[in-house]
Amino acid sequence: MGEAEGPVAMLDVLVVEDHADLREEIAYYLRTRGMTVRIADGGRAMDRAIAERRPDVILLDLGLPEEDGIEIANRLSKDPQSGLIVITARGRVEDRILGLNAGADFYLVKPLDMRELEAAIASVMRRREPPSHPWRLDMARWQLRTPAGIAIGLSEAEVRLLRPFFEAPASVVDRHLLVERLEIDARSIDLLVHRLRRKVEAETGDELPLHTVRFRGYAFAAPVAF
């Protein structure tokens, strides 16, 4: 499995979990997705890690031996600089409410699906991003407009490439769908994406947020509109 590109790549994640095997499994998976991952087996180790460097997201197990996870979540919520995802075996509604009221952005019940965990991290980061103007696709003029309003002229193939991402915002568009729509092979799709990225950067200085999702396709990792 290769590293991810997009909203979760290059994040700093702190995993606070006392179960060694699960802690290492989570850390291994997130590292393969391009994240920087540190681990802690309890509240004290977590505090030391935060003092060293504030993480983007904290994954917090509620069943810790030294200090109850809800107490830790309440403590973290007083200085909410990091996203907080609770991971726990406690699946009752009452426990979920306690965790969310303590300041958790997400509440995930074990056993964890690592794909769901990755999606939760990405969602937390999107929530915490300041609002931005969308990228706009002008079908009539064959133009892509950046959030700053700069217009990039597009070819017919580039318009057809981008349209699915604007029709279904925040979705992963399968490479096979693009192959069918553009009636070219997968290698040509990748080459078209590469050239469009270079064009946008050359004309605007901005990076086109069209990211590769390994083994699946592409995702447009920014707000969009027609």
Image (cartoon, grey):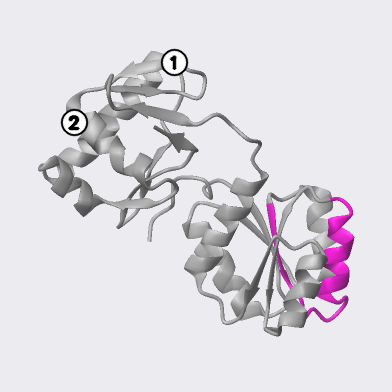
Task: Please state if 45 lies on the left or on the right of 202 as rendered.
Answer: right
Residue hosting label 2 = 157
Disc 2 element: helix
- Under mark 1, the amino acid is Ile
User: Is residue 174 visible in this depiction of the protein?
Assistant: yes
Query: In the image, is residue 30 above or below residue 161?
Result: below
Pick whichever of labels 1 and 2 is earlier in the sequence.
Answer: 1
Q: Is-magenta flag for residue 65?
A: yes
Query: In the image, is residue 47 above or below residue 94?
Result: above
The quarter in which the C terminus is drawn is top left
Residue hosting label 1 = 150
Residue 111 placement: quadrant? bottom right
Residue at position x 50%, y 38% from top?
Answer: 223
State the separation of the CA atoms marked 1 and 2.
20 Å
Q: Nearer the viewer, residue 224 or 109?
A: 224
* Residue 6, image x, y percentages: 47, 45
Report the number of numbered marks: 2
Q: Which residues are magenta?
A: 57-79
